[in-house]
Image (cartoon, rainbow, N blue to C red):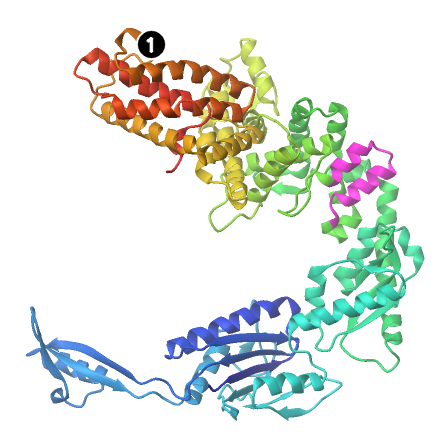
Amino acid sequence: MPQLLLEFFSEEIPARMQARAETDLERLLMDKLTAAGFLPEGVKAFSTPRRLTAVVEGLPARQPDVREERKGPRVGAPEKALEGFLRGAGLKSIDEATVQKDPKGDFYVAKIEKKGRETAEVIAEIVPEIVKAFPWPKSMRSGESDLYWVRPLQSILCAFDGEAVAIALDGVPSGRSTEGHRFHAPGRFDVRRFDDYRDELKKRFVVLEREERKAIIAREAKTLCEARNLELVDDPGLLEEVAGLSEWPVVVMGDMDPAFLDLPGEVIRLTMRTHQRYFAVRDPKSKKLAPHFITVANIEASDGGKEIARGNAKVLSARLNDARFFWDLDKAKGLEDAERIAKLDKIVFHQKLGSVGDKVRRIEALAVELAPIVGADVAQVRRAAQLCKRDLVTETVGEFPELQGQIGRQLAEIAKEKASVAIAIEDHYRPLGPNDRVPTDKVAVCVALADKLDSLACFWAIDEKPTGSSDPYGLRRAALGIVRIVLENDARPPLAPLATSARWAAAGQVTEVAAHNLSMQQLKAFRAAGVGDEPVKINASVLPGVEQTGSLENAIALLEGRGFEIVTFIVDRLKVQLRDQGKRHDLVDAVFALGDDDLVRIVARVEALEAFLKTEDGKNLLAGYKRAANILAAEDKKGALKDIDFAAPVDAKLLTEAAEKALAAALAKAAPAAKGAVEKEDFAAAMTALAGLRAPVDAFMTDVLVNADEKAVRANRLKLLSAIRDSLAAVADFSKIEG
C-alpha cells in the first residue's frame, strides 16, 4: 500500500525536546488520519537536530466512501426546520429525503453518500493542522510570519506514494526534497520513499535513527578509551543528550591538565557534563578519574579531531579553574564558618515553615530521639544533624546544586570529623529514587529518617499534602525513602510517636512551661509532672484547630492523631512497594488495620499471611471466617447481640453438639498459641496454630445450627463465632481480605 513520508526541516531542535516530539508527531498523525477515516498500519517518527520525520505505512489511495442515514424533523415540521435539515444533509429538496415511521410518528431521513477524497488531498489539509497544533514546550515565530515552531521552519518534505504533496503553510517551501549535513553535504536532493530517504541521508552524513547515533557514540568512545587502557564513566542521560546534538557523531578524546585531579571527582565530572557535555573517563582498576575526556563533534575534521580536542581542552581548563576557585574557598572556610552558618537562617525553607536553619534544629531534635532506638551514637547523630545542611551555603554547591551532601561529606572528612558523621552528611538525602541505595550507617539512618519525617510533618502542618497529580515537595519520595530505609536496615522505629514528635516540632508551639521544640516524650513528662492543665498556645497558621484545645492533654491527643495520618501515608507507600513486588494490597490493609506502625513487622505479617492463604487450610479458614462474620453482622443488624456478654467465656455446659465441642476445644488451643507466636513475631507459627481451626470451623458451619430455638444456646454459639473472629484478629483483620 502507499506510504506517506513527512519531514519538518528546521534550525536546531533542542536535544531535550526531540524524543517527546517524536511521540507527539506519531500521536497527532494517528489521530488526524483516524479521524479522516484511515486505519494506518503503523506510524514511526524520527528526529535529528535539524529534522523531525515520520513515515506512515498502509494508507489507501483514497478515503473510504461514507454512507450514513441522518434523521431529520417530523413530517409537517415548520419550514425553517426543514430548510436547516436540507442544508445540513446537503439535499436540494425535501423530495430527496425518505420518510420513516417510528412509534413517535413519521420523520424525514436523509441517506447521505459522501465519496472519499484522494488521500494526498486529505494529507495536504492535515499537515498544516499538525504544525499549528504541535505541543512544543517552547516555540518561536520567525520574521513576519504568524507560524510558530520550535525553531524557524525552513521546508517540509511531504511525499505520498512517491509523489510530492504540496503543503500550503505560510510560504514554507514543500515538496519531496531535503538537505543532508550542513557542512559535509550542503544542498538539496529528492527522495520518494522512506528507505531511499534514510539511505540517502546516511550518504550525506546524517544518521536518522537516534538509537543508531547513541550506539555509534558508545562504541567509538569505548574504542578510544580501551586504546589507552581507560574506561568510560557511564552516563545514559548525557549519551541521550549528545545523540540529539549531532547528525553525524564523531567521537574525540581530549586531554586535561592532571593538576585538576586534586578536585573532587564529582566536581570534575559535573563541570564536564553540565557545562561542556563531555564524558569523563577513569582508570578501570582504581576507578579514579583520568586526565582525559570524551567529546562528540558533529563533523569529521581533516586532522582527525586534534584541533577540536585542543579547543575543548582549553574551554574545560577555564571551567575547572572556576571550580577550583570555589573549592579552595570552601576548603578555607570549612563547615564551621560562623558567617556561613548564619546564612542558613536566611535561606527560606518554605514561607510558612521558616528557614533551613529551623529545619536543621528540628532534624537534630528528632534524630537524637531516634538515636537510641536505632542504636546510634547520640553525640555523632547530633553532630551530623547540625552539619547536614551546611554545604548548601558553599560556593561549590551554589555552582553545582547536584553535589549537596557530597561536598559536605568531603569538607567534613577534611575537618577530621568522625567517619559516620561525614557519611551521614551525604547519605541523609538518600535514597534519591527507587533505584538509589539507602543509607546503612546508623548515624546516617537517624539523620535521613529525621529529615524525611520532618518534611512530611511540616507540609502536613500547612496542608500541602500530595494530590493525585501533584507532589511539588517530593513527599511521596520522602515516604518511600522512609519505607526503604526501615526495611533494608531492619530498623524498628515506632513511627507513630516519631511522626507526632515531628508534627509537634512543626507547630511552632509555646507553653508557659517550655519555649518550643518539645518532643512528645517531653510533653508527656510535663503531663506526668502535673502541668497538664497549663494553657497551650500553638501557632494557628500552621496547626489549625489546636489553639482551641485548651490543655496540654488535648493537644497531645490531637497531635497523636495527626501523627498517625503521616504514618498512614507512609504505609500507603509501603503498599505501593509491596504491590510492585507482586504482593496483595488487601493483605497490607488487613495487617495495618491492627494499628501497627512497625514496617518490618507489617511486612513479616503480610508475607506469612500471603503464604497461609495460598494453602487449602488458609482458603477454607478465610471462608469460614467470612461466614462467621456475616452471621454476626446479620444478628447485630437485628439487634440480637446487644444482650450478649462477649467478654464472658463460652459456657461449656451449653455445648451439646460434637462439632461445637470440637470447635471450642480447638479455639482454646489455637488462640493462645497464635497469640504467643505473634508476641514472639513468629508469624509462620501463628498461622500454623490457626490452621488447626480449619477442620473444626468447617464442621461447625456444616453441622451446627447457630440460630437455635433456645436463647442461651444461640448466644453461646454466637460467642463461638465471635471467638473465631477474635482468634484470627491476633494476626490480621480478616474482614479486609478479599476473596
Report which residue position mark 1 lands on. Answer: 648
Q: Residue at x 38, y 79 (%)?
A: 36
Q: Foreground: 568 or 68?
A: 68
Give the dominant element type of the magenta stretch: helix, strand or loop. helix
Magenta segment, which residues? 403-426
Residue 733 picture quarter: top left
Q: Is residue 625 left or right of residue 156?
A: left
Q: Is residue 506 left or right of residue 717?
A: right
Looking at the image, which residue sits at the far top? Answer: 653
Residue 489 picture quarter: top right
Q: Foreground: 62 or 87?
A: 62
Residue 81 percent location from the top left of the image? 14, 78
Residue 118 picture quarter: bottom left
Q: Is residue 91 left or right of residue 467?
A: left
Quadrant of the drawing holding the C terminus? top left
Callout 1, which amino acid?
A: Ala
Residue 665 percent location from the top left of the image? 38, 14
Q: Residues within 10 Å of mark 1 (few under 14, many from 20)?
A: few
Residue 511 percent location from the top left of the image? 56, 20
